[in-house]
Every structure is written in C-alpha cells, then in structure tokens.
Image (cartoon, rainbow, N blue to C red):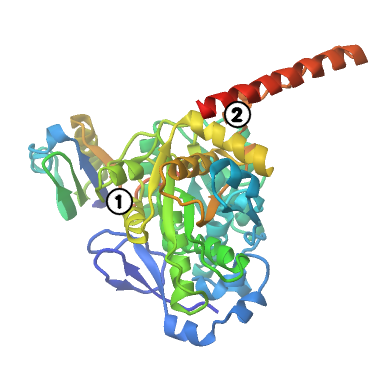
Amino acid sequence: MAKQRMKFTFPTELIKEPVIYRLCKQFDVVTNIRRADVTEDRGWVILELEGDMEEIERSVQWVIDLGVRVDPVVGDIVEG
Amino acid sequence: MSYASHLRCRECGRCYPLEPVHVCEFCFASLEVSYDYQALGRRISRQRIEKGPLTVWRYSDFLPADREQAVDIGAGFTPLLPAQNLGEALGLRRLYIKNDCANPTWSFKDRVVTVAATKAREFGFDTLACASTGNLANAVAAHAARGHLKALVFIPADLEQGKVVGSAIYGPTLVAVKGSYDDANRLCSELTDRYPWAFVNINIRPYYAEGSKTLAYEVVEQLGWRAPDHCIVPMASGCLLTKVWKGIKELAWLGLVDWAHTRMSGAQAEGCSPIVEAWERHSFNVRPVRPNTIAKSLAVGNPADGYYALKVLADSGGSAAAVSDDEIVEGIKLLAETEGIFTETAGGVVIAGLRRLVAQGRIQPDELVVAFITGAGLKTQEAVLDRLVPSLVIEPHLASFEEAIAEHREAVAAGRQTSRGESHG
C-alpha cells in the first residue's frame, strides 16, 4: 500500500461539491484530512491518500479533471 | 559549532530530532530548525563573528551544520554597496544594494546549498538532488562536485540549452522531465519518498532554508552592526523574506544589534504574484497560480512559505508590489546604468518593486533601505536581448564615425529634453 500527501485547492464552483466523498466512493482509496481552510468562494484541504499506487494516481487524475488543483504539500518543488 | 537543537512544526509546534525530515507527521506543515539561544547567547559576540572566514560559514554558530565539515565553494560575504546614483533616480537618500550576483555560481542559492550539502554529508547521503530551471540547479551541481557527492538535477525537458550549461559543466546527472510544471512537481515529491537522496528543497529543506539567514547577518555587519530600516526582497516561495527577517531578529535577541524595527517588503512579477495578490486582498490565504512571466527564477505558482511571508510583511509593517515584465526589464537596465550591476530578472523585479513602493509612499526617502539582488544578469540575457542593440553602426572611416556620433548626441539630447518635459508635464 502506498501513501501520498497532497494539497487540493478548490475553485469557487466546486466548493459545494462533495469531491472527497465521491473520490472515496469511486476509487479504492482511503482519505485522511489533516488540515483545511474552506470559505464560501475558495478552499484548500491537505490530506493523505492511501491505497494501491495506480489507484491513487487514477483518483488524483479524476480530481484534476474535475477542476481541482493538486499540489505537493510542500509547495512547488521546481525552483528557479 | 552548531547550536541547532531540534526541528519544530511551524503550525502545531510539535518537536522532532534533527533528522532529514521536513513535514510534521500530524498536520503535514513544514518544519523549521530551532536553536539553543541561551547557550548561543553565552558564546556569541561580534568579535567572535569577525574572526570567522569571509563566507557564510562566518555565521556558523547560527547555522544547523558544522563549519569544520562544510562543503564550501566560497558562498557569501558578497558586497553591500551604497547606491547613491540609483537612490537619486528613485528618491531615496540611503539606499544600499546587497549584490549576491557575486556568489560562486552567481546567485544567492549558493548560500542555501552550501548548508544543505554540508548537512546531507553529515546525514550520510551520497546524492544531492533538486528540481530547478536555473540558479538552484547550478548551485547544487557545483557543491556536489566540491563535496564528492553524486548530483541529480531534474530540469524541464524544454529548458533552453543556455541554461543547461551552467549546471552540466559540473558533471551532474541531468534528468530532463517531459510534461507540465505540475507533473514535474508531483514526480519529484514522489521520488523523495522512494529514493535515499538528499533532495535539497524537500527532505533537507529545513536546513537548506537556514542558509538564507546569512544575508541578514552580513547586511547588519556590513552596515557596522546596524539593522536596516527597510529591506526589499524578491519573493518566489516566500522563504527568503522570512529568513532575512529571522536573521535580523536573532541578532537583536542576542544583543548583537539594537532592535531597529526593520520593515520587510517583498516584490513579485505580475505574471506570478500569488503572495502579492493575497496581500492586496488583505488575506493570509494564498491562491496558487500558473506562472507566466520572464522572471523564471521567481516563477513559483504555489509558494510553500507564502503564508509565512505574508505574516512577516504584516508583522514588520512592510508592503508588497507586483510589477509587469516591461517594468522588470526597465529595472534591470536602471540598476545596470546607475550602479554597474547586471542582475537577472529577479533583481529587475526588486528594483521595479522598489520604485513602485517609493512612488506609493510605502518606503520613505530617509529610510536606510537595502535592496537584495539575488542573481546575475548573464543567466537571463534573453530578457533584455532585443532591447540592447549597438548605438551606432558606421563605415570604417573617420567621417562616418563623426557624422554618426553627432547625430547620436543630438538624439540623446532630444531624448533627455523630451523626458524632462514629460516628467514636468
């Protein structure tokens, strides 16, 4: 089993959508939220995804396709 | 010796031993090095520092690595120049330039990488790694060579050849990553979990980041043990701004300098300004962006330290400005033409941001201001290339030269006349 730490940033149009709930339903991935800040127009969630690596990658791609921005929890790694 | 005592979570405050870890296991926030300031306070003095080498290792008591074992190519102790010409152009009476172009690989990244490489060797790593489009890659490759470490440098597959040379010359393994910037970020994050490498800005990041504090120590010492009234710093991840501030505060806590209430201001390029955007919204919530600017060395769309940089701006009474690509080029030219320093685009951001903040009255004419110029211009020549052409093209005889120079002088005089008219209009 693999674990991935991620930061999801939600645009306004997805704030009311139960994205993380649907992710758990559609993929065999366990989510574990550690920190979050959600307002009426924007939000971010820092969480851990646990499961088979390929399943995690598929679930992350599904989230990205929905319009959620997915980043490493440490921010951008590629520097100038 | 190092007085580093432990790592501490910046959010929940949990403590961790000094190991190659970077994220709190509970809240996934970043970790920062803490020191035994009581023990350090008993030992430290200006005289002790002044006896040290003319490199960042002069301040080894404030760093989390051992000077005796340092991977040292001479980073630091770069010039602090009074910038009277530029000051006059901007309306500042006491402006200084901290010229970090003078580092061994021509950017401030040598400061952070010398600490990261030293710590990596202390931890027993044999490979130093990073993902970078320029300055960081150069510094990692050079320090790995010096420190007998293997180097792995991840670069975007479409990176210009000219930027590859500055790293390739030191003999690292260069890995060109196809795909988007986001893809490269996620890949590197996964690699850290899988391979036993010292990834300088991931698992070694708490130690790496501390190297930036040396900019503050040097400025204070070079000013005759006086803290500046105002610092203006380029912001990418936001880390540099927070560490300059931390460095000044440490000197004040330890009684090495009078507390001067230094104000910290930051500058970004409009095409990648998530920190300034949050600042202008009066929010501490940074919204990630997709970078689109000529200032590639500041193109961090999801800044790891954005929140903490905003806190420093607010706590210190500073401000922030985002400037256009045209202003960046003007800033590069202005610094070169007034002070003889050719900076890369990040320096153009600083000068243009400084000009903006002075015009807005956020920086006062009498303040002792230090502008941090973090990298040399030869690395980003493409930014100014199309604006720099020979002033005169002549036939190889005297008459041609004299005709051309007369026309040129007339044009210059007319230009000056016009610009005076405009400025008074």
Residue B54 in picture, x, y percent from top left: 68, 67
Q: CA distance from mark 2 to mark 1?
A: 35 Å
Figure check: A18 above or below B19: above
**Identity of the residue furthest to the right in this view:** B398
Circle 1 is placed at which residue position? A73
**Identity of the residue furthest to the bottom in this view:** B42
Circle 2 is placed at which residue position? B384
Figure check: B233 above or below B156: below
Badges 2 and 1, same chain: no
Could you tell whether B380 is left or right of A54 in the image?
right
Identify residue type, mark 1: Val
Q: Secondary structure at mark 1?
A: loop
Q: Secondary structure at mark 2?
A: loop
User: Which residue sits at x=14%, y=47%?
Assistant: A38
User: Which residue sits at x=7%, y=40%?
Assistant: A18
Figure check: B153 above or below B422: below
Residue B239 in picture, x, y percent from top left: 42, 55
Q: Chain of mark 2?
A: B
Residue B125 in picture, x, y percent from top left: 51, 63
Pick whichever, B242 or B191, lies toward us.
B242
- Neighbour tally class for label 2: few under 14, some 14-19, many 20 plus, Cα within 10 Å: some
Nearest-to-viewer mark from 2 and 1: 2
User: Which residue sits at x=46%, y=86%?
Assistant: B39
> Where on the picture, by quarter, is residue B292?
top left
Could you tell whether B103 is left or right of B297 in the image?
right
Identify residue type, mark 2: Val
Q: Chain of mark 1?
A: A
